[in-house]
């Protein structure tokens, strides 16, 4: 008689192989997103499509690949997954566009539903390959357990920031925004005080970063300041045409010509909101990466304060969250340095990640790429020399062939694959080094020191910049001395003194890892470029260098010999830095020129000084000025010459009409204004009552009183914008 058949044996024989988490997540996202593409009117389906589209492009492919090649999925691997996904999505879009231009000219890749179908198909195939051919051994995910109440409390901070920005836009009420800025300044103090184990440090940094960056981008009804409008116009042309034709300079960067249209179409959202949400969400990772890098070589407390310093620097959250090229290049640079220094990641795949991140750098910004390459080229020989001459030093993880590969990739990309960008990059770097690094009378540093700051907030920004530079130099010098002493035969006494006085937060890894200390040294050499409003300036290089240099000033703002003092100087300095330079102090106490005037715009327009109004209108764009621009482009004759001021607002990048006149502009001159055929006075002119004729720096303009015009000459007005016509003028 045969033995009874066991039900458990039947279940075991029919049990499917273990499905990795990444495959399950990818399948869910792909299926749900595909369903959301169906032409069915379901309430909330647009939100679902947007969220899933963002996850599809920003996380799914990287998660699939990285989980399949690692035995343990660490928290830092989530950062790699996001960076690799964004780089891969951009590369695929660039490849599809190149294929369309050269092989299939009738196919337009940047149109719907073509683009979504292509990405769903490609990532679906990747999911199938990982499921079929990948290792199905269950991976261990080392995520810490968090208290939901604490997480909800921290998540409240960015939610309040976004709500406050929307209230300013729609109701002109800034009370919630001012309260949120004050709460953000208190978050590091509270977390540092009560989180003794540092468990919530990364979460708190992410919350603070999201709050500051999203508040600054959502608060702008329309894009303004920096290169946002130019980037918007390039991306909009791609969406309208269905393909991208690379140009020179900004128009040659796939970050603008590929990634913006890609997110806009896949998320099915407006290009304006894609600029205001997608890049800020991605860039807010940079302080978290700063924490991850710093925590490898310093204590968690130093890493937390360093990441807080980075995001509290005004140019970080005020500019880089909106400047998508620079912000993306810095994000990829941070991830590149993190993976180069990550000894625990499997070596062959680490090289692949590093190559993907480096391509992301040079594909995002033509200026940041060569700077990063310079830092790598500087670090390589120092690593090799130090590992040979000093004891107890690890060999370089930057092999010479890889450094050569990065250099060749940079030259080939800018010289052959982008139009005219190589010559532009060489010219920018030469002019920057020859005229701005050295302290000549025309150097950026000299001009910054001699320039009269328009308010207390700007004074704190300037002298804070200088102080950070001094403390960084001293802190890096002390750490490097400690690093050298660790490798000398008779350096024990010097080691003990440095450990007792300054370097208590320094880990043993920093003393033996030549790669970290020399990458820091290479980045540090770029610090002089951060002075002044030039192409390579505080808005770009300061955000780049402080991403890696942030721990060194923090070391000198902590007392290791006096426990009662501890980190109080660092926490107090960070609190004051944010309160003063965020616009909170200007909006509530001093009422002077603010670094972030958009949070107090109504008061500035109603009763602010002329200088405050200049500051506000440099960054703010109002609907009425867009309407005036649309009227002129739609109705003025071709080749008309319009007289306008230097601060006058003309926004052709936001024009969506079918007819656009090729209008020329010339400076409004008081003596010749009576003979001008067309004179355009925008809101900044009529509100300030000035005729600005030259930008002098910061918020300063050279100006004269605005000439008066009779109402009979007015052919168009929005109430504050005016277009005057003189039939006998020229």
Image: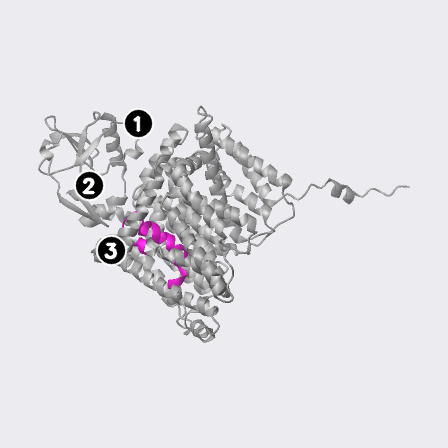
Q: In x, y percent, where is residue 481?
A: 41, 68
Labels 1 and 3: the sequence-earlier one: 3
Q: How many marks?
A: 3
Q: Say which quadrant the N terminus sits in.
A: top right
Whether pointer 1 and pointer 3 mark residues with C-beta atoms closer than 8 Å, the reply is no
Q: Secondary structure at mark 1?
A: loop
- Name the residue that disc number 2 marks: 646
Secondary structure of the residue carrying tag 2 is loop
- Mark 1 → mark 2, Cα distance in angstroms: 25 Å
In the picture of the structure, the residue carrying the numbered disc 3 is 448
- Name the quadrant containing residue 449: bottom left
Q: Secondary structure at mark 3?
A: helix
Image coordinates of residue 590 in percent, x first then y, are 23, 57
Query: Chief secondary structure of the magenta span?
Result: helix
Q: Position of residue 596 (x, y in %)?
A: 29, 50
Q: Is residue 693 above or below residue 680?
A: below
Question: Are the residues at dot 1 and dot 2 in contact (C-beta closer than 8 Å)?
Answer: no
Which quadrant, please, contains the C terminus?
top left
**Would residue 59 be visible to someone looking at this image?**
yes
Whether the magenta-drawn stretch holds residue 535 is answered as yes
Image height of 306 relative to 685, above or below:
below
Nearest to N terminus: mark 1 or mark 2? 2
Taking depth in this image into account, of 489 and 292 the one nearest to the observer is 489
In 3D space, how far apart are the residues under numbered discs 1 and 3 (Cα atoms)? 42 Å
In the drawing, does residue 237 fall left or right of residue 266? Answer: left
| Residue placed most toward the observer, 653 or 440 | 440
* Within-10-Å neighbours for mark 1: few <14, some 14–19, many 20+: few
| Of callouts 3 and 2, the N-terminal one | 3
Q: Which residues are magenta?
A: 528-553
Q: CA distance from mark 3 to mark 2?
A: 23 Å
On screen, residue 121 above or below 178: above
């Amino acid at each position: 008689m045969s033995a009874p058949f066991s039900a458990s044996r039947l279940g075991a024989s029919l049990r499917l192989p273990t499905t990795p988490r990444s495959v399950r997540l990818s399948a869910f996202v792909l299926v749900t997103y595909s369903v959301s593409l169906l032409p069915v009117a379901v309430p909330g389906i647009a939100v679902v499509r947007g969220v899933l589209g963002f996850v599809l492009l920003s996380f799914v492919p990287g998660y699939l690949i990285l989980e399949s090649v690692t035995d343990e999925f660490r928290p830092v691997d989530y950062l790699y997954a996001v960076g690799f996904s964004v780089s891969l999505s951009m590369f695929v879009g660039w490849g599809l566009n190149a294929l369309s231009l050269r092989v299939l000219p009738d196919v337009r890749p940047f149109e719907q539903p073509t683009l979504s179908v292509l990405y769903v198909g490609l990532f679906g195939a990747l999911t199938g390959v990982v499921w079929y051919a990948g290792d199905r051994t269950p991976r261990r995910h080392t995520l810490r357990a968090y208290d939901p109440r604490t997480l909800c409390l921290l998540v409240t901070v960015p939610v309040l920031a976004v709500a406050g920005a929307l209230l300013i836009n729609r109701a002109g009420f800034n009370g919630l925004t001012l309260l949120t800025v004050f709460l953000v300044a208190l978050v590091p103090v509270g977390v540092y005080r009560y989180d003794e184990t540092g468990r919530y440090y990364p979460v708190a940094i992410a919350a603070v970063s999201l709050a500051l960056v999203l508040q600054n981008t959502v608060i702008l009804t329309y894009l303004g300041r920096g290169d946002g409008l130019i980037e918007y116009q390039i991306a909009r042309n791609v969406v309208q045409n269905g393909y991208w034709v690379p140009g020179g300079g900004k128009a040659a960067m796939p970050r603008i010509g590929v990634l913006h249209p890609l997110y806009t179409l896949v998320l099915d959202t407006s290009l304006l909101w894609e600029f205001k949400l997608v890049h800020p969400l991605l860039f807010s990772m940079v302080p978290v990466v700063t924490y991850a890098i710093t925590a490898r070589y310093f204590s968690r407390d130093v890493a937390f304060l360093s990441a807080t310093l980075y995001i509290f620097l005004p140019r970080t959250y005020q500019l880089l969250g909106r400047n998508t090229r620079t912000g993306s290049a810095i994000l990829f640079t941070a991830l590149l340095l993190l993976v180069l220094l990550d000894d625990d990641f499997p070596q062959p795949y680490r090289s692949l990640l590093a190559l993907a991140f480096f391509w992301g750098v040079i594909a995002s910004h033509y200026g940041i790429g060569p700077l990063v390459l310079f830092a790598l080229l500087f670090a390589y020989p120092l690593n090799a020399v130090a590992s040979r001459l000093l004891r107890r030093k690890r060999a370089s993880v930057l092999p010479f062939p890889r450094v050569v590969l990065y250099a060749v990739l940079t030259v080939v990309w800018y010289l052959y694959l982008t139009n005219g960008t190589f010559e532009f990059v060489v010219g920018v770097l030469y002019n920057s080094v020859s005229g701005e690094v050295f302290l000549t009378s025309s150097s950026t540093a000299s001009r910054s020191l001699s320039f009269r700051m328009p308010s207390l907030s700007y004074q704190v920004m300037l002298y804070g910049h200088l102080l950070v530079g001094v403390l960084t130099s001293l802190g890096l010098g002390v750490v490097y001395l400690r690093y050298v002493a660790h490798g000398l035969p008779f350096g024990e006494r010097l080691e003990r003194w440095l450990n007792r006085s300054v370097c208590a937060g320094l880990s043993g890894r920093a003393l033996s890892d030549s790669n970290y200390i020399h990458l820091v040294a290479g980045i540090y050499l770029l610090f002089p470029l951060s002075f002044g409003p030039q192409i390579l300036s505080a808005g770009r290089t300061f955000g780049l260098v402080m991403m890696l240099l942030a721990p060194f000033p923090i070391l000198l703002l902590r007392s290791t010999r006096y426990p009662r003092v501890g980190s109080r100087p660092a926490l107090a300095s960070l609190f004051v830095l944010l309160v003063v330079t965020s616009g909170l102090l200007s909006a509530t106490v001093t009422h002077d020129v603010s670094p972030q005037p958009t949070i107090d715009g109504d008061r500035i327009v109603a009763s602010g000084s002329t200088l405050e109004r200049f500051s506000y209108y440099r960054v703010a764009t109002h609907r009425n000025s867009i309407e005036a621009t649309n009227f002129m482009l739609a109705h003025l004759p071709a080749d008309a010459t319009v007289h306008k001021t230097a601060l006058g607002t003309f926004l052709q990048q936001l024009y969506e009409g079918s007819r656009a006149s090729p209008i020329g502009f010339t400076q409004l001159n008081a003596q010749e204004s009576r003979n001008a055929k067309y004179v355009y006075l925008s809101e900044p002119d009529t509100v300030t009552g000035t005729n600005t004729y030259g930008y002098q720096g910061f918020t300063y303009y050279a100006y004269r009183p605005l000439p008066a015009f009779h109402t009979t000459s007015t052919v168009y007005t929005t109430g504050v914008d005016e277009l005057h016509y003189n039939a006998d003028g020229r």
